[in-house]
Amino acid sequence: MEQASVTARAATGTGWAAFAGVFFLVAGTFHVIEGIAALSKSRYLVAQVLFANLEFWGVVLLVLGGLGIFAGYAILSLQETGRVLGIALASVGIVVQLMFINANAWWGIVMIAVYMAILYGLIVKGEETRGYPPLSDA
């Protein structure tokens, strides 16, 4: 019976949680950069957003980026808190990108696809974040 448990734990190690964690680190970093660009009124961003102004979205992207970096670290540390925060942030991230999409359309579409892949990794393959004890030779 012990061998079946070890085999089941080994089979769950498909890497989706690690994928989600690393992508949160990358996406969080990109959001911080994009937030700084929005606050500095960079020329590559069009000042057409769904509501508010570019400075507001710059602050939103900075906060989302910082929380995304934290979530990526927590996911890679196999903390259940990281998984829950990751699911919430990916869901919010999709909505934010939809509202910010007029400013940078192609990047918004790419980020929505990334967030959907993160959601898949954390919801469907989320058991990898539970931090199982190391596999034994028994």
Image (cartoon, rainbow, N blue to C red):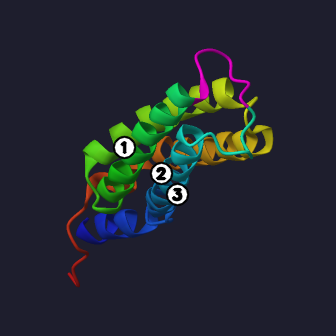
> Looking at the image, which residue is at 75% across and 40% down?
109
N-term-proximal mark, 2 vs 1: 2
Q: Nearer the viewer, residue 131 or 97?
A: 97
Q: In which quadrant is the N terminus drawn?
A: bottom left
Instruction: State the CA–CA distance, disc 3 to disc 1.
Output: 13 Å
N-term-proximal mark, 3 vs 2: 3
> Looking at the image, which residue is at 72% across and 47% down?
110
Say above or below: 25 vs 55: below
Instruction: State the CA–CA distance, disc 3 to disc 2.
Output: 8 Å
Check residue 30 for magenta coloring.
no
Q: In which quadrant is the C terminus drawn?
A: bottom left
The quarter of the picture where residue 67 lies is top left
Q: Residue beneath label 2, please?
A: 28
Q: Nearer the viewer, residue 32 or 55?
A: 55
Amino acid on which disc 2 is placed: Gly
Check residue 52 for magenta coloring.
yes
**Tag 3, which secondary structure?**
helix
Question: How crowded is the residue under tag 1: few (<14 C-alpha within 10 Å), some, or many (20+)?
Answer: some
Q: Are marks 3 and 2 in contact (CB under 8 Å)?
A: no
Q: Are marks 2 and 1 in contact (CB under 8 Å)?
A: yes
Query: Disc 3 vs disc 2: which is toward the camera?
Result: 2
Horizontal side of 44 relative to 11 (left or right) equals right
Query: Disc 3 vs disc 1: which is toward the camera?
Result: 1
Q: Residue beneath label 1, please?
A: 67
Q: Residue beneath label 3, please?
A: 23
- Residue 119, x across and y down, in percent: 53, 41
Amino acid on which disc 1 is placed: Leu
State the extent of the magenta-drawn residues as a range.
Answer: 47-54
Q: Nearer the viewer, residue 50 or 88?
A: 50
